[in-house]
Image (spheres, helix red, strand yellow):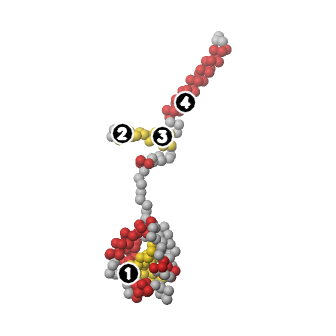
Amino acid sequence: MQPKSNRAFGKSLAVGILFIAASVLLAGCGGGTDTATSTTGTATTATTSTSGLKKIPTPSTLTVKPVDTTVNKFPDQYTVNILFTPNSDTPAFFADAIKSKKPIFVEFYGENDSISDQMAAGIAELQTQYASQVTFILLNSDKPQTYGALSEQLPVQYVPQVFIFNNKSTIIRSYTGYSDKARLDQALYDAVNRGY
C-alpha cells in the first residue's frame, strides 16, 4: 500500500500528463484554423485563414484599380427637348451662337476643380473633331462676369456642367459632374446627325 501523499501525487501527475497531451493534440489540429502552404519556385509562403473566411490581402498583394470615372456621380438634371429661348439678359455671344443654327456645346467648369481638369483633355479632342460642325463655349464659373445671366437661364447648379444644344436651340443633353469623352462624343454625334 502506498502512502496517501504518493497516491495524490500520482493522480496529479496523471492529470497533468493528460492536460499536456490534450494541449498538444489541439495545437496539432489547429483549433479551427486551416493552414495551407504553397511553394512557388524557391520561395515558400504560408497563408492562414479562419474557416469560411477569405484571407485579407496585405498591401503587397493588393491590386489598385483606378477610379471608375465613367460613372456619372450626379444624375442628369434635364431630359431631352428643352427649348432655350433667349431674352434681353442673354449674353450677346450666346445669342449669336444660337442664331448660327449650329449645335452648341456649353461647359461651365471650375478653374481648380479636379473633375473639370479630368474632362479637359477629352473636351479638347472633341473640339478638334467637331470644329466645323459645333460651336464650343467653355465658361469659367469663377468668372461669372464673362457670361452674365446665362448660368441662371440654363441654370447651372454644379460644376462641371455640360449642355448640348441641337441646331434649333433645344437642349438635348445636360450632364452634371463627370462625363467621359465617349458620352460627350455620342451626344455631339446625336446633335449633329440626328438633332436629338
x 40%, y 40%: residue: 45
Does the rendering let one see residue 83?
Answer: no
**Is residue 2 or residue 156 the one in the foreground?**
156
Front label number (2 vs 4): 2
Q: Earlier in the sequence, mark 3 or mark 1?
A: 3
Whole-number angstrom distance, CA of label 1 to CA of label 4: 80 Å
Front label number (1 vs 4): 1
Identify residue type, mark 1. Answer: Thr
Whole-number angstrom distance, CA of label 3 to CA of label 2: 21 Å
Q: Identify the residue position indicated by label 4 in the image.
A: 23
Q: Identify the residue position indicated by label 3 in the image.
A: 34
Q: Identify the residue position indicated by label 2 in the image.
A: 43
**Figure quadrant of the C terminus:** bottom left
Q: Secondary structure at mark 1?
A: strand
Categorize mark 3 by other alpha carbons within 10 Å: few (<14), some (14-19), many (20+): few
Task: Find out whether the residues at labels 3 and 2 contact each other: C-beta distance under 8 Å.
Answer: no
Q: Identify the residue position indicated by label 1 in the image.
A: 135
